[in-house]
Image (spheres, rainbow, N blue to C red):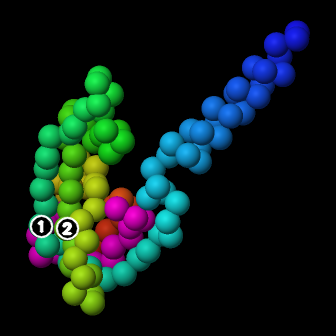
Amino acid sequence: MKYLPFVLLFSLLYVFYQRWIYRDKDDRGPTLTGPATVKSRRVEQGSYQGKAPTRYQGNTRGNWNYFVTFTLSDGEEIELYAGEGEYKALKEGTSGQLTWQGKKFREFETDD
């Protein structure tokens, strides 16, 4: 019983660390939406630190990281991390409404 406060404190600190400090900084930024065109796509092998995959590895299968470059309406180009399914669905030259947060792809609704 005398160790219960320490266990509770450790548990709370661990949860705080996982949710606020360790989590990807891109999750803290605003979610933005705007017109964009798919410019290019690329795949690179995921990098490993010891036996643990990179943070973005969790969004993909295997050990590959998927990137899609978009041209925004003002001409700015941004490269975003995408999942394998989104990567395969996005084709160069397609225009639509892009939603992203930091360096992470969130959604792309094509123009009809």
**In the displayed structure, would residue 45 be above or below residue 100?**
above
Q: Kindly identify which numbered label has been placed on residue 112.
A: none
Depth order, front residue of 80/88: 80
Depth order, front residue of 105/111: 105
Circle 1 residue: 40
**In the displayed structure, would residue 66 be above or below residue 104?**
above
Depth order, front residue of 80/11: 11
Highlighted range, magenta: 90-103
Amino acid type assigned to the residue bearing label 2 in the image: Thr
Task: Decide: few, some or many residues near mark 2? Use Cα within 10 Å; few <14, some 14-19, many ≥20.
Answer: some
Is 94 contained in the magenta span? Answer: yes
Q: Position of residue 91 (x, y in %)?
A: 13, 66
- Secondary structure found at label 1: strand
**In the displayed structure, would residue 17 be above or below residue 36?**
above
Is 110 contained in the magenta span? Answer: no
Residue pictured at 22% horizontal, 37% vertical: 47
Residue pictured at 28% horizontal, 25% vertical: 50
